[in-house]
Amino acid sequence: MEPKKSKKSTIQNIIFIVLIALLLFSPVGTFVKVQLNRLIAFSPKTIAVTEQKMLSTYQWHLKDDTGKTVSLEVYKGKIIFINFWATWCPPCIAEMPSIQKLYVDYQDKMVFLFVTTDSFEKANAFMIKENLTLPVYQSLSNPPLEMESSTIPATYLIDQSGNVIVAKIGTANWNSDSFRAKLDELLKK
């Protein structure tokens, strides 16, 4: 009797290890992680006015997929939505559909910068596969100190005066009614 119990336990352990490996290292695992992140994504909160920091510099240079270089300086005085992301990051993938919806409605009213460390080839292939039209950039210099993060996704909303009014690390629902209301309020200024 003892050997049967041991054999059953060994088989259960092997199945458990295989399932964990699938979740950690396969597209199935990425899908599960993305779905879980979408379930827990909430609307981002605005930083209290007394806690907001002004950008220390607009001297941050980016490159788009055509090779064109742009400085954050050209967007001074505008509302700027900056998202740091990567194609291999499940929380980044999870929030992309909500960002896409926001981008479709606000792209003519404010600036959107989606900054990745991935190659443009990889990032653009991801955008096509996911049916996204977000403008992708790579950083050519360090971002302002107020936007440095070792974690992605990291998203920042800069108002017309250069204040960082949202600094969200992790997944968020960027298409929420409350975030849209905040943008509409900013756009009236």
Image: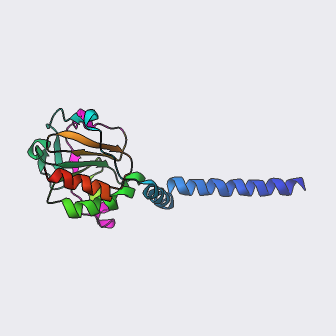
Q: Is 17 left or right of 186, judged from the image as shown?
A: right
Q: Residue at x 34, y 51 (%)?
A: 86
Depicted 61 relative to depicted 6: above or below: above
Residue 153: x and y in percent read: 35, 47
| Count of numbered tags | 0
Rendering quarter of residue 159: top left
Instruction: Say which quadrant the N terminus sits in.
Output: bottom right
Q: How is the image coloured?
A: rainbow
Rendering quarter of residue 65: bottom left
**Residue numbers of the magenta segment:** 125-150
Q: Residue at x 33, y 66 (%)?
A: 129
Q: Is 36 left or right of 106, judged from the image as shown?
A: right
Q: Residue at x 14, y 57 (%)?
A: 109
Residue 144: x and y in percent read: 21, 35
Q: Nearer the viewer, residue 175 or 139?
A: 175
Residue 111: x and y in percent read: 17, 52
Residue 102: x and y in percent read: 26, 60
Res. 19 in view: yes
Magenta span has 57? no
